[in-house]
Image (cartoon, rainbow, N blue to C red):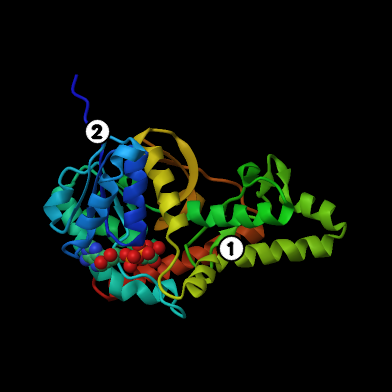
Amino acid sequence: MIFKRPKIALIGGGKIGSLLAQMCSYRQLGDTVLFDITANFTKGVALDIAEASRTEQFNVNVTGDHEYQSIENADLCIVTAGLPRKPGMNREDLLVANAKIIKTIGENIKLYAPDSYIIVITNPLDAMVTLMQATTGFPKNRVLGQAGVLDSSRFATFIATELGVSVQDVNALVLGSHGDMMVPLIRHANVNGIPVQELLYRKYGNREKADQVMHDIVERTKKAGEEIVKLLGNGSAYFSPASSAYMMAEAIIYDKKRVVPACAMLEGEYGIEGYYAGVPVVLGRDGVERVLEIDLDKKERELFLASVDVVVKLKEDLKQLGYI
Ligand code: APR
């Protein structure tokens, strides 16, 4: 029997791409190619990581390149190429600049890695995933976006800090588009099964105060990317996006069947037809193996549909611009 190590192409060798190269190598997820348009930078990053192989004790290959041929026969492509947000810019402002880049990358993935799975991270996320799927023509289970894992992780972090409990015991889900209209699900947030709303009520002894604190956590979650952009002053978050994408990559490569929120194509689920949006999915060997539908109450559903409207508009913009 011939065993083949998975090949991971990281397309975009900036902050998130470089961190992912380190994670994929140190944790031996597979052989990694770090691709970027810059000629030498990714070669330097990859060599630097490779030179840690003795001390970190890993046996996979990591290389940097700027020729598309280097991604040939990749099993998994993680796309971060593009421009990050600058202070004052929203994710939609990036649409025009990044659409051009994603289209070129999609064409090259189709050419060199036609059987690969693709996780897109580049913003505006929902539009870039839509464009990637349209450009490659890959089946919907093989093209998905990273956003929900990160948004939910942020939501869980803020809840854990507020309640003084381990974040490991917090389950919190964020649905919808990756932007200001995302929908952190208050009713479903729990600490090992105990509703967060109930724990906040016990903490404050007053329903109004508990609701206010929850509201503040939800608002902070929605603006969490912007909070980091402002603090960094140059560029956007990279540790947590890399960590979220790595978790998704591992779920696919190890066929883990993880249940995570991801930007996936909806064809009838949640009453949506033909649009990408953040929903819970089962992630395994076949990529998005299933979209899980959960009951939303009237208010949650309204918020979710308003969030999907953002994606509808972005898709319309892509059409107007002639990208799809
Ligand atoms: N092909 C390949 N790489 C490209 C291309 C291209 N056509 N155009 C730009 N790049 C590269 C840049 O050279 C840069 O190295 O994409 C990289 C982006 O890296 P950073 O600017 O460091 O951005 P990063 O923080 O990694 O974020 C990447 O993820 O969260 C999103 O909004 C964020 O869209 C941004 C993306």
Q: CA distance from mark 2 to mark 1?
A: 37 Å
According to the picture, the residue beneath numbered tag 2 turns out to be 5
Ligand 1 positioned in quadrant: bottom left
For the residue marked with disc 1, what is the amino acid?
Thr
- Find residue 298 and name its label: none
Residue that sits furthest to the front in the current view = 55
x, y percentage for residue 47? Answer: 23, 50
**Type of amino acid at the residue the image marks with label 2:** Arg
Q: Secondary structure at mark 2?
A: loop
Horizontal and vertical percent position of residue 32: 25, 45
Q: Is residue 133 visible?
A: yes
Which of the pair 180/169 is nearer the observer?
169
Q: In x, y percent, where is residue 102?
A: 26, 63
Nearer the observer, 177 or 244: 244
Q: Tell me residue 153's x, y (percent).
A: 55, 52
Q: Is mark 1 within 8 Å of ligand 1?
A: no
Which residue occupies 65% across, 42% down?
A: 169
Farthest residue in the right direction? 205
User: As displayed, is residue 158 above or below residue 315?
Assistant: above
Quadrant for the C terminus in the image: bottom left
Residue named by callout 1: 221
In the picture, measured across the screen, residue 217 lies left or right of residue 278, that is right
Residue at (18% x, 52% y) in the render: 110
Q: Badges 2 and 1: C-beta atoms under 8 Å apart?
A: no
From the viewer's perspective, tell me whether residue 64 is left or right of residue 207: left
